[in-house]
Image: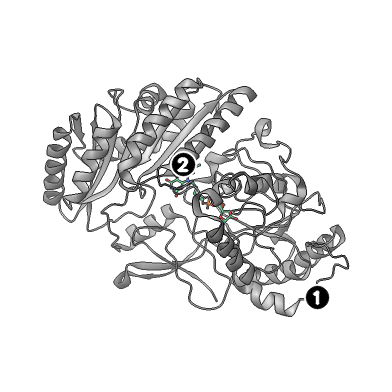
């Protein structure tokens, strides 16, 4: 049986696989209920390219259903389709669904149009795609192996699905060159959500791929198990594993004259080696959004600000950290340093940061938002934020900005209300990505490449690196079944030519 060993040494994505495939990465970071609103207006954009451009190679995301493909391919190298098509025919797909239903049982297989629809689209992004042909709900590793074998036999794409929060069309089914009206097997992992083993002595645990971080926190709390994970430099762990019990948490907020001063303060604080678990940069518009959202118990100064989360073994250590941080931020012109006096206040303060997506959207009631991220070396962050804000103002769009300042990751939520604004927002994202790459950064820090950012890969990494990545993917997924169409620019598409 193959499991994930999620070692919380800085990232929930740190995994180790122990035995046989498939390898399933842990995910599901957010409450799903947030993300299921219907969004028909923008989601069903027709494919922007000819279908033939959408059949290409992908790397790690598709690795999900793992090296199981290895024996699957060997066993079933003669797929049933008689044509030379890359994927099976519609009849092959129908046979695959029949076989899945017969082997897994009808309660683990759905072709209900509502299920297909909800597994094909997301309210969080606006990329083109189609629904999967079928949704399967494995409960065991053996179920997953059976699904992959069936997919291999009938040459059917396989797309994992977990919390469904990804923002770049990662779980869209792709159009294929044979113009199937449906796009493969969606593997909904949500029934595989158990924590299987906890190793306090190794500071890690073994869980199924859809174990929820909040459930993990709850379980650890109930059992009184502290897991160590380091804080320094990590700025994006706000949604992750609590260090409790045995460690304490403090939260503080400080306002700065500008992003540059805030970034400089962070650099000095991190270099002091104090117990910072996270430090989040937010801009003045974010603070305005928080004030108007109506949930916060405070009225914030509407200035570029930092949210700090401190961590330490004792109250005394927290106090010391807070004092050092207070001194440094003052040096860089901060005012209004607000330190939570107890856990309740700490949660309140942090909640304002956590509401970012919804407070941002509420700035323009009824608007939609493109949420995107890029990442640059920390020292270049002020320049990136400055230029991007200037650009957004020039094109007349409202946007909130949040940065995980410790690692140079920067998120924008760009609001739009109609097609014209949507077009302008997409243009602004394109310029923001190119700006980040020009500043020695990357097109995405944590949201991932998916469909939306694949056209930037060659510009960022160079043709040779992209070719190497494709070669690795091909070695483990020769039939291009695992989440096809994502991550790499299609070979003969305008996307890949654009950056040559
Ligand atoms: C409001 C909001 C805030 C966000 N904040 C953050 C943040 O702070 N930090 C951050 O990192 N991200 C953030 N994201 C981005 C997103 O939530 C993450 O990328 C998240 O990790 C996606 O996980 P998921 O379970 O929802 O995956 P899904 O959206 O279900 O899937 C994402 C991709 O991974 C594949 N996949 C799913 N499960 C598996 C598996 N077990 N094995 C292999 N592949 C799999 C899917 O096929 C798909 O291609 C945010 C998103 C939103 C909407």
Nearer-the-camera pick, 291 or 461 = 461
Q: Is residue 7 above or below residue 310?
A: below
First in sequence, mark 2 or 1: give its number.
1
Residue 328 lies in what quarter of the image? top left
Q: Secondary structure at mark 1?
A: loop
Nearer-the-camera pick, 327 or 471 = 471
Q: Is residue 157 left or right of residue 349?
A: right
Residue placed furthest toward the front: 500
How many labels were placed on the picture?
Answer: 2
- Ligand 1 lies under 8 Å from the Cβ of mark 1: no
Residue 122 lies in what quarter of the image? top right
Quarter the N terminus occupies:
bottom right
Give percent across and percent down for residue 253.
25, 34
Q: Could you tell me if residue 230 is visible in this image?
A: yes
Count residues near mark 2 (Cα–Cα under 10 Å), then give few for <14, some for 14-19, many for 20+.
many
Give percent across and percent down for residue 202.
32, 71
User: Where is mark 2, residue-wise?
Assistant: 373
Residue located at (71% from left, 39% from top): 48
Give percent across and percent down for residue 32.
53, 45
- Ligand 1 lies under 8 Å from the Cβ of mark 2: yes
Q: Secondary structure at mark 2?
A: strand
Residue located at (31% from left, 52% from top): 234
Residue located at (60% from left, 38% from top): 123
User: Where is mark 1, residue-wise?
Assistant: 78
Q: Is residue 395 above or below residue 34?
A: above
Give percent across and percent down for residue 2.
53, 74
Count residues near mark 1 (Cα–Cα under 10 Å), then give few for <14, some for 14-19, many for 20+.
few
Residue 327 lies in what quarter of the image? top left
């Amino acid at each position: 049986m193959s499991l994930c060993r999620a070692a919380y040494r800085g990232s929930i994505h740190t995994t180790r696989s122990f035995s046989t495939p498939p390898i399933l990465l842990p995910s599901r970071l957010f409450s799903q209920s947030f993300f299921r609103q219907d969004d028909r207006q923008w989601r069903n954009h027709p494919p922007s390219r000819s279908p033939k451009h959408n059949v290409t190679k992908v790397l790690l995301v598709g690795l999900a259903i793992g090296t199981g493909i290895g024996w699957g391919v060997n066993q079933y190298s003669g797929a049933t389709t008689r044509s030379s098509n890359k994927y099976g025919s519609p009849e092959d797909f129908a046979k695959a669904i029949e076989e899945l239903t017969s082997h897994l049982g009808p309660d683990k297989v759905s072709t209900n149009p509502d299920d297909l629809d909800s597994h094909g689209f997301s309210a969080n992004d606006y990329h083109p795609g189609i629904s999967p042909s079928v949704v399967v709900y494995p409960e065991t590793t053996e179920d997953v192996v059976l699904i992959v074998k069936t997919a291999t036999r009938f040459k059917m794409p396989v797309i994992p699905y977990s919390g469904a929060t990804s923002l770049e069309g990662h779980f869209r089914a792709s159009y294929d060159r044979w113009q199937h009206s449906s796009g493969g097997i969606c593997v909904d992992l949500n029934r595989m959500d158990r924590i299987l083993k906890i190793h306090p002595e190794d500071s890690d645990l073994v869980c199924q791929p859809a174990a929820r971080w909040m459930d993990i926190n709850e379980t650890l709390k109930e059992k009184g198990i502290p897991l160590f994970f380091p804080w320094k430099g990590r700025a994006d762990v706000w949604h992750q594993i609590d260090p409790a019990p045995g460690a304490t948490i403090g939260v503080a907020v400080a306002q700065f004259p500008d992003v540059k001063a805030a970034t400089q303060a962070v650099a000095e604080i991190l270099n002091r080696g104090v117990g910072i678990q996270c430090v989040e940069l937010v801009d003045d518009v974010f603070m305005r959004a928080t004030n108007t959202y109506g949930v916060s118990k405070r009225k914030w100064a509407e200035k570029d600000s930092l949210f700090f989360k401190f961590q330490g073994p004792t109250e005394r250590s927290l106090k010391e950290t807070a004092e050092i941080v207070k001194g440094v931020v003052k040096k860089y012109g901060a005012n209004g340093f607000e330190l939570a006096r107890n856990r309740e206040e700490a949660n309140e303060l942090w909640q304002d940061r956590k509401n970012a997506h919804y407070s941002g959207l509420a700035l323009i009631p009824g608007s939609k938002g493109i949420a995107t991220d890029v990442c640059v070396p920390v020292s270049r962050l002020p320049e990136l934020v400055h230029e991007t804000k200037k650009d957004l103002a020039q094109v007349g769009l409202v946007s909130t900005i949040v940065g995980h300042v410790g690692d140079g990751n920067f998120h924008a939520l760009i609001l739009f209300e109609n097609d014209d604004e949507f077009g302008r927002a997409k243009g602004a994202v394109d310029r923001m990505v190119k700006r980040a790459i020009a500043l020695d950064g990357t097109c995405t820090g944590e949201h991932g490449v998916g469909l939306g950012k694949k056209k930037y890969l060659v510009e960022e990494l160079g043709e040779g690196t992209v070719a190497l990545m494709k070669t690795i993917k091909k070695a483990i997924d020769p039939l291009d079944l695992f989440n096809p169409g994502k991550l790499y620019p299609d070979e003969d598409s305008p996307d890949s030519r654009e950056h040559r």
